[in-house]
Amino acid sequence: MSEPAQSVKEVFEVQIPARLKAKPDLIGKINAVYQFNIAGAEGGNWSVDCTLPGGAVVSGTAAAPRCTVSMADADFLKLVTGKLNAQMAFMTGKIKIQGDMGLAMKLQQLLG
């Protein structure tokens, strides 16, 4: 992503939709729904639906996500700006993943 995100909301409302639009083949490769539960003052809940044509990012909770990602807002921003290694964050408990770990491995393509 070109400019570093200033907020978690910006990542979900601007950067991820732009990434989906710029890389439509990514939607077909993923073909699943992610749920993001971001804790903290800047946090919130968003779902990224890669089963719909063009993909969709929606504020709130998805009915049946195949992969749920939970983490703190500051850690999420570090992750998307490349200041936090995803594998290290997972190993140290900064990222919690529920569901399909194969989809979790594809997250880097979506986020950054």
Image: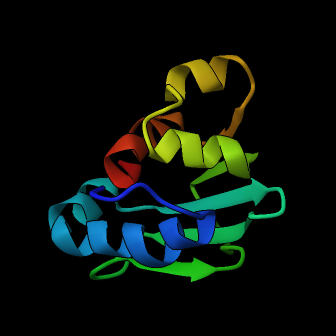
Q: Where is residue 25 in the image (x, y as percent from the top left)?
A: 16, 62
Above or below — where is 89 with respect to 4? Answer: above
Q: In percent of the image, x 53 and y 30: which residue is there?
A: 84
Q: Which of 65 and 83 is in front in this view?
A: 83
Above or below — where is 18 with respect to 2? Answer: below
Q: In which quarter of the image is the N terminus?
A: bottom left
Specify the quadrant of the image occupied by residue 45: bottom right
Q: Position of residue 82 (x, y in %)?
A: 43, 36
Above or below — where is 46 with respect to 53? Answer: above
- Residue 107 shown left or right of residue 87 in the figure: left
- Using the rendered image of the protein, determine whether residue 25 is visible from the camera's viewpoint: yes
Colour pattern? rainbow
Q: In percent of the image, x 69 and y 46: which residue is there?
A: 74
Q: Which of 98 and 93 is in front in this view?
A: 93
Q: Where is residue 85 in the image (x, y as percent from the top left)?
A: 50, 25
- Residue 97 shown left or right of residue 32 in the figure: right
- Tally the marks: 0
Q: Which of 5 and 112 is in front in this view?
A: 5
Above or below — where is 36 with respect to 102? Answer: below
Q: Nearer the viewer, residue 74 or 28?
A: 74
- Residue 27 shown left or right of residue 8 in the figure: left
Q: In percent of the image, x 17 and y 70: which residue is there?
A: 22
Q: Where is residue 58 in the image (x, y as percent from the top left)?
A: 57, 81
- Using the rendered image of the protein, determine whether residue 50 is visible from the camera's viewpoint: no
- Residue 92 shown left or right of residue 76 in the figure: right
